[in-house]
Image: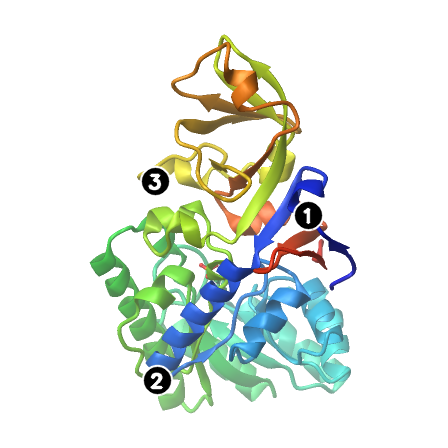
Amino acid sequence: MNTAHSPKLDAIDTPAALIDVERMQRNIARMQTRMDELGVRFRPHVKTTKCVDVVRAQIAAGAQGITVSTLKEAEAFFAAGIGDILYAVGITPSKLPRALALRQRGCDLKLILDNAAAANAVVEFGKVHGHAFEVWLEVDTDGHRSGLAPGHDALIEVGRTLQDGGVEVGGVMTHAGSSYELHDVEALAALAEQERAGCVLAAERLRAAGVVCKTVSVGSTPTALHARELPGVDEVRAGVYVFFDLVMRNVGVCGTNDIALSVLASVIGHQPDKGWVIVDAGWMALSRDRGTAKQSHDFGYGLVCALDGTPIAGAAFVGANQEHGIVAIEPHDADALATRFPLGMKLRILPNHACATGAQFPEYYAVMPEGHVAVWSRFHGW
Ligand SMILES: Cc1ncc(COP(=O)(O)O)c(C=O)c1O
């Protein structure tokens, strides 16, 4: 929420998480436009930001419903007035009372699962409490994580268990997370098609077996932006696109000047002989995420930029302790290091993984296009 205004970026204490609102709005518009062109609904994954202000901007641009990764997000966004929520992490029996409480308060909460044990648990719990849950079946279309195989009999068996037990099978959903390992346009388009085809196949098989399955839901940021057509798909989900990050830059779906999240840091010292500038943002601020380490360009702990967001040539974020960051300057002039990067100088660090870096902070400083700064809170925990 906009709880405070700070007139100057330079006055914010460090480390702090900044949102470049102009870039964020551009990213939101880009994704929504693409979804409109593809003729599908868009359900953003809000785990990236966990921030009501950001999600309101996504909904204002045309998003319909949200995806969450925790029940805490579901509770917080429902309290903020958003009712259509897909909880996209497999349900466990211990979480069913909280899910039920949300639904009884009027939240259109949809659960997911990918196995018979979970299906039986939802059926039994629903019977005991006289409640018909809505469940979407998670489908595995790229082998990277969870989900039922689209062509396997288990998919039909789980669907029937739910439907026969009084649970609404509202849809099928998949997330081709292996897209993060790619960086080639054709390979990304092929994976988007694989994601689409697998999920549509699952829906068709369920329907042919008499299981009502309204919605087909697919998506990750790279596949959403590379899908050429989406016949049979009703909605797409994507999360990290709203901020983008260096991992997405290496995948090839954004440039560094699209990255809307950065960590504001201050210079706290120098090691002139080594060419090091020490800053007050370590892994506690940037996170331990080294997602770019195995990609085409390893950005260390982040891309070092000046306060205006321009990358500083020759500066590499090579090390991170809890509250210390080590920025190596190449080539360096030992005598001039402290003059070039004086004590207290503010730097902006673009993150490897926006979801992980954002999660280190209790709030964002949203830098508006006109230059003023608002404080937007974000949720934590489960
Ligand atoms: C189930 C599910 N859907 C959608 C997404 C969004 O993916 P991305 O952040 O690549 O847009 C995720 C991300 O982890 C996810 O787990």
In this figure, which residue is indicated by the disc labeled 2?
204
For marks 1 and 2, give the CA distance.
55 Å
Q: Mark 1 vs mark 2: which is more N-terminal?
A: 1
In this figure, which residue is indicated by the disc labeled 3?
295
The answer to whether residue 8 is left or right of residue 259 is right
Q: Nearer the viewer, mark 3 or mark 2?
A: 3
Count how many numbered circles sit on residues in the image: 3
Quadrant in which residue 104 is drawn: bottom right
Q: Is residue 31 above or below residue 40?
A: above
Q: Nearer the viewer, mark 1 or mark 3?
A: 1
Q: Report the residue that reaches farthest toward the left.
A: 186
At a point 42% along the width and 91% down the height, the residue shown is 210
What's under tag 2, amino acid-wise?
A: Glu
At a point 66% along the width and 43% down the height, the residue shown is 16
Q: Mark 1 vs mark 3: which is more N-terminal?
A: 1
What's under tag 1, amino acid-wise?
A: Lys
Q: Is residue 24 above or below residue 31?
A: above
Quadrant in which residue 326 is drawn: top right
Residue 115 x/y as whole percent: 51, 67
Q: Does the numbered disc 3 mark a residue whose Cβ is under 8 Å from ligand 1?
A: no
In the picture, the disc for residue 368 is: none
For marks 3 and 2, give the CA distance.
37 Å
In this figure, which residue is indicated by the disc labeled 1?
8
Which secondary structure lies at badge 1? loop
The answer to whether residue 366 is left or right of residue 130 is left
